[in-house]
């Protein structure tokens, strides 16, 4: 005899439906792309990928925001590849615009792996290197161009860049691309693109005025937002270390006595300060590289790849490296100087705690920077705990200035600039302007 069926108890709580694990199988992506995804080692789509990919594959314009390190790059590259899979080859059909050369190279590397089985070719177009190879690729033979604005415009002025077949435009780090430093170049590029196209904007931070401005370029955009655009990545532990300005370098060196600081990205406000801090660390026999807009392209590439490979324990950088750079296993971000705008803090500390990892963000805060710290706390709506390093001599006086005084070399200049056109972005809070 079969057991009696259990009577349902009307007072019993409804069983909570078990959440199904998200899968790339559920996304409208061709099996050829899924092979690339597997080779990338991705097991399941992140939230921004789940939310953005179906709409983008469907052809919608999109404003996508999600915290740093949560898979935005694949969230726009996968639908782009999907849309290009069918259709002609040998014509430029997608353009991805990024603010730095490093990001252009990184996006192209993602494309290479994700699109390996898609029979689509891409070229990265950026300054600081020769034009000839890029020209050859642009003259025919690529479907996807990843570019920094300045160098792309140089090529465009020579009239061999043909955007007539362009279907998809992506502005990566969109709020940076639309601030006053880049906006004129971006407008010139936009003016050469077909009006009928899909436009995708992605960033971790997206001030309301940028969204307003961006609507000029978009048609009925869908907004996909995961988390707050004023929040830092989830796995980051923040700590502020108040310290007199002249003791910052010694405090940094003392912090680095801790071996758990194994892969450390140090941000300064200026190129000159980046060089100086790197020199001081190097004098203390710490393996250090430096990256900023005055370094040659090959120096920039070498410094970043040595840091990636773990040959440099420390990379000192300006905000050039604050956005998007994806280095696995950055254990700590140190703000040697606080950034001038809170958004930059979010991007800087987002270089650690990537893809569900954890990381620490230490900020060395001189008394003059207390207000900047409070502005960051207000923006993030958090209180960053203050801490002191036990045993460190905070009270040692500043050394006497050299006879004749210091030369004034430490003023902020190009704080992380863009495509290498020698056009420094404006200082202070980024400004966004309508036409
Ligand atoms: P992004 O936010 O695009 O810079 O990506 C941050 C990191 O997450 C990169 O190292 C990506 O390779 C990685 N990533 C992106 N999507 C996934 C995924 N679905 N699963 C695991 N890791 C991912």
Image (cartoon, rainbow, N blue to C red):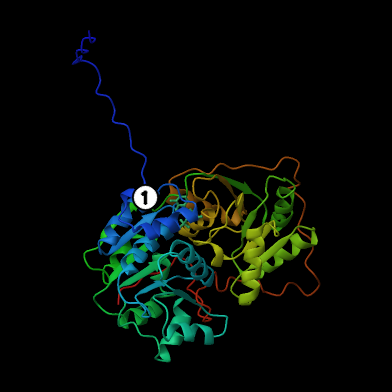
Above or below for 307 versus 242:
below
Q: Pointer 1: residues within 10 angstroms few (<14), some, or many (20+)?
A: some
Q: Residue at x 49, y 61 (%)?
A: 324
Residue 380 shows in this picture: yes
Q: Is residue 336 visible?
A: no
Work out which residue is located at the far top of the displayed protein and give it.
Answer: 1
- Confirm if mark 1 falls within 8 A of ligand 1: yes
Please tell me which residue lies in front, 310 or 221.
310
Q: Position of residue 96 (x, y in %)?
A: 40, 71
Query: In the image, 149: left or right of 239?
Result: left
In the displayed structure, 245 sits above or below 159; it is above
> Is 239 situated left or right of 380 in this image?
right
| Residue 101 % position (x, y) | 52, 72
Image coordinates of residue 238 in percent, x first then y, are: 55, 45
Residue annotated with mark 1:
24
Answer above or below: position of 151 versus 218. Answer: below
Residue at the farthest front position: 1
Q: Quadrant of the C terminus?
A: bottom left
Report x, y in % for residue 113.
48, 62
Quarter of the figure with residue 316? bottom right
**Which residue sits at x=45%, y=61%?**
114
Q: Between residues 391 and 104, which one lies in front from this camera angle?
A: 104
Q: What count of labels does the image hold?
A: 1
Secondary element at tag 1: helix
**Which quadrant is the N terminus positioned in?**
top left
Q: Quadrant of residue 11?
A: top left
At x 25% / y 20%, what residue is drawn? 13
């Amino acid at each position: 005899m079969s057991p009696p069926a259990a009577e349902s108890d009307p007072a019993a709580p409804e069983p909570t439906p078990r959440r199904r694990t998200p899968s790339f199988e559920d996304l409208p992506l061709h099996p050829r792309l899924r092979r690339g995804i597997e080779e990338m080692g991705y097991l399941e789509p992140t939230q921004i990928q789940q939310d953005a990919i179906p709409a983008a594959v469907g052809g919608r314009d999109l404003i996508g925001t999600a915290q740093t390190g949560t898979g935005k790059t694949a969230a726009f590259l996968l639908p782009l590849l999907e849309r290009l899979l069918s259709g002609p080859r040998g014509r430029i059909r997608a353009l991805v615009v990024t603010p730095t050369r490093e990001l252009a190279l990184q996006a192209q590397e993602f494309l290479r792996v994700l699109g390996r089985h898609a029979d689509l070719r891409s070229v990265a177009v950026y300054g600081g290197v020769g034009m000839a190879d890029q020209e050859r690729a642009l003259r025919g033979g690529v479907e996807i161009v990843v570019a920094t604005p300045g160098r792309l415009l140089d090529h465009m002025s020579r009239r061999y860049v043909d955007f007539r077949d362009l279907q998809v435009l992506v502005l990566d780090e969109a709020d940076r691309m639309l601030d006053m430093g880049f906006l004129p170049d971006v407008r010139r590029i936009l003016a050469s693109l077909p009006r009928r196209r899909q436009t995708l904007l992605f960033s971790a931070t997206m001030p309301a005025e940028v969204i307003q401005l961006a609507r000029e370029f978009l048609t009925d955009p869908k907004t996909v937002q995961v988390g707050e655009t004023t929040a830092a990545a989830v796995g980051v532990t923040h700590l502020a270390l108040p310290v007199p300005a002249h003791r910052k370098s010694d405090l940094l060196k003392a912090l680095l006595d801790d071996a758990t600081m194994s892969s450390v990205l140090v941000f300064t406000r200026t190129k000159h300060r980046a060089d100086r801090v790197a020199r001081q660390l190097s004098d203390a026999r710490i393996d250090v590289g430096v990256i900023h807009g005055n370094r040659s392209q090959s120096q920039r590439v070498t410094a970043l790849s040595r840091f990636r490979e773990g040959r440099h324990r420390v990379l000192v950088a300006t905000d050039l490296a604050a956005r998007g750079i994806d280095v696995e296993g950055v254990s700590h971000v140190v703000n040697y100087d606080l950034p001038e705008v809170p958004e930059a803090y979010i991007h800087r500390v987002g270089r650690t705690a990537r893809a569900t990892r954890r990381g620490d963000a230490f900020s060395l805060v001189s008394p003059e920077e207390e207000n900047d710290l409070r502005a960051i706390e207000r923006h993030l709506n958090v209180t960053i705990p203050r801490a002191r390093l036990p045993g460190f001599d905070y009270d040692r006086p500043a050394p006497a200035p050299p006879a004749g005084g210091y030369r004034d070399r430490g003023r902020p200049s190009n704080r992380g600039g863009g495509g290498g056109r020698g056009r420094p972005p404006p200082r202070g809070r980024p400004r966004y302007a309508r036409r």
